[in-house]
Image (spheres, rainbow, N blue to C red):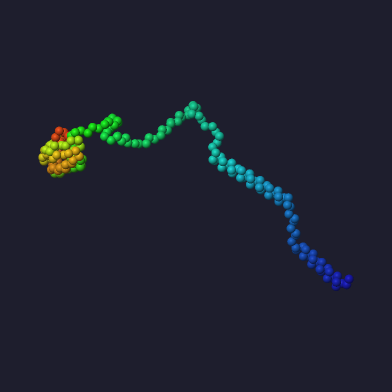
């Protein structure tokens, strides 16, 4: 081998050695058995954690098995029984009856009776002393027979506030109404005042109830 060829081979070998030294080391062969073992351990840890979480949640939902004290144990309060709330109701008596002492009894309509409706002034209306006002009543025949014509509606009791003391009524058949109006003057004295009138035979008692204030 001539010297030139020898030098070329030596140079080539040196370069190959240098490249081999600079080249990265080959990757190690993976250990499949180790990888499988690590996966198995991770799965086991995950299962354990899930079971622990499920147990905690179940403890929050399901009450413990600690026995409760019975009602017969000393010191245990006696439970007060709860009664159902009574539904309020109104007793409506049968037709043609009235309630007496909580019991409906037959109502016998009288032959002669009356009532006053649409009374003015309203109860407890206030007036100044000696103030003038109007009294209005509607007399209704609530009996089974007619009230004769000329029956008197007259003053009965209390301070005499009306400017008259008597009114003659027309004939009132059962169910008939008679509207009347008269002048009145409030008492001078401060306070509550009630004046009562009555239909002849004391069939009913129309009234006025007012307050006198300064």
- Asked if residue 131 shows in the view, the reply is no
Residue 166: image x %, image y %? 11, 38
- Asked if residue 35 shows in the view, the reply is yes
Q: How many marks?
A: 0
In the image, farthest residue toward the right: 1
In the rendered image, the vertical position of residue 120 relative to residue 99, given as above or below: below
Residue 155: image x %, image y %? 13, 36
Residue 106: image x %, image y %? 26, 31
Tell me the quarter of the image containing the N terminus. bottom right
Residue drawn at point x = 77 percent, y = 65 percent: 19
Residue 104: image x %, image y %? 29, 31
The quadrant where residue 112 appears: top left
Tell me the quarter of the image containing the C terminus. top left
Q: Describe residue 163's horizontal placement relative to residue 1 as left or right.
A: left
Q: Describe residue 121's horizontal placement relative to residue 52 as left or right.
A: left
Q: Describe residue 94's horizontal placement relative to residue 205 as left or right.
A: right
Residue drawn at point x = 19 percent, y = 38 percent: 174
In the rendered image, the vertical position of residue 75 relative to residue 88, given as above or below: above
Residue drawn at point x = 35 percent, y = 36 percent: 88
The quadrant where residue 122 appears: top left
């Amino acid at each position: 081998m001539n010297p030139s060829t020898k030098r070329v081979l030596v140079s080539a070998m040196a370069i190959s050695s240098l490249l081999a030294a600079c080249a990265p080391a080959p990757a190690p062969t993976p250990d499949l058995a180790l990888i499988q073992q690590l996966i198995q351990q991770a799965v086991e840890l995950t299962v354990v954690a899930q079971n622990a979480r499920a147990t905690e949640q179940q403890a929050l939902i399901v009450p413990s098995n600690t026995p409760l004290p019975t009602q017969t144990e000393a010191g245990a309060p006696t439970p007060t029984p709860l009664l159902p709330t009574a539904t309020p109701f109104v007793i409506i008596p049968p037709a043609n009856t009235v309630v007496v002492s909580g019991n409906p009894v037959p109502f016998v309509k009288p032959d002669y009776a009356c009532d006053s409706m649409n009374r003015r002034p309203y109860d407890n209306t206030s007036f100044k002393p000696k103030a003038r006002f109007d009294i209005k009543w509607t007399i209704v025949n609530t009996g089974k027979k007619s009230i004769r014509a000329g029956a008197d509606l007259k003053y009965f009791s209390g301070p005499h506030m009306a400017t008259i003391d008597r009114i003659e009524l027309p004939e009132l058949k059962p169910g008939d109404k008679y509207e009347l109006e008269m002048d009145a003057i409030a008492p001078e004295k401060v306070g509550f005042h009630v004046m009562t009138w009555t239909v002849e035979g004391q069939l009913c008692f129309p009234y006025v109830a007012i307050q006198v204030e300064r």
